[in-house]
Image (cartoon, rainbow, N blue to C red):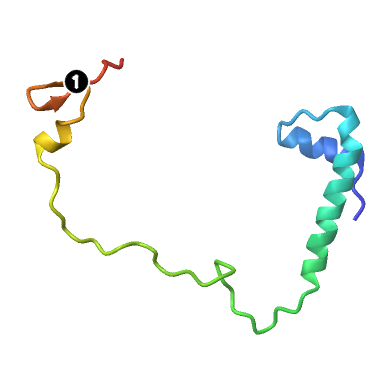
Amino acid sequence: MEITADQVQHVARLARLQIAPEAIEKLASELATILAYVEKLGEVDTQGVPPTSHAIELINAFREDVVHDHLSREQALRNAPAQDEGSFVVPKVI
């Protein structure tokens, strides 16, 4: 599929992109290559192939939710650079 410089400029305008004039011809060529590949994919026989959301089968990769002992307040504050009355002291952010 042939892509013209005017088409590239039109799409760039729609996408609110500024493209240098010297890059338009190269971009038109690259877009034509991409569209040719997409047309080639349209020729593939997909009859009988079920639709998928991923190219490979995915499984749930989450770990089991198991209750564990947590750190005590003293352990959590042990390496704190600053603490006050059992809490972390952090810089004020406004």
- Name of the residue lying farthest toward the left: 85
Residue depicted at x 30% and y 17%: 93
Q: Quadrant of residue 34?
A: bottom right
Q: Is residue 48 shown left or right of residue 80?
A: right
Q: Residue furthest bottom?
A: 48
How far across and how far down the image is residue 47, in percent?
69, 82
Q: Position of residue 29 (x, y in %)?
A: 89, 46
The quadrant of the picture occupied by the N terminus is: bottom right
Q: Is residue 18 left or right of 80 when viewed as pictured?
A: right
Q: Is residue 94 left or right of residue 28?
A: left
Q: Which residue is mark 1?
A: 82
Instruction: Point out the image quarter for the C terminus.
Output: top left
Q: Nearer the viewer, residue 87 or 59?
A: 87
Which residue is at a point 39% across and 66% down the rendered structure image? 60
Which sits in the foreground, 9 or 72? 72
User: Dot 1: what SS?
Assistant: loop
Residue appearing at x 16%, y 36% in the figure: 76
In this view, the residue in front, 69 or 34, is: 69
Can you tell which quarter of the image residue 11 is in?
Answer: top right
Q: Is residue 63 above or below residue 5?
A: below
Q: Check disc 1: other Cα within 10 Å, few if <14, some if 14-19, many if 20+.
A: few
Picture coordinates of residue 85, whole percent (x, y): 7, 23
Q: Horizontally, is 5 left or right of 76 in the view?
A: right
In this view, 25 is above or below 44: above
Residue at the far front in the pictured view? 79
Q: Amino acid at mark 1?
A: Ala
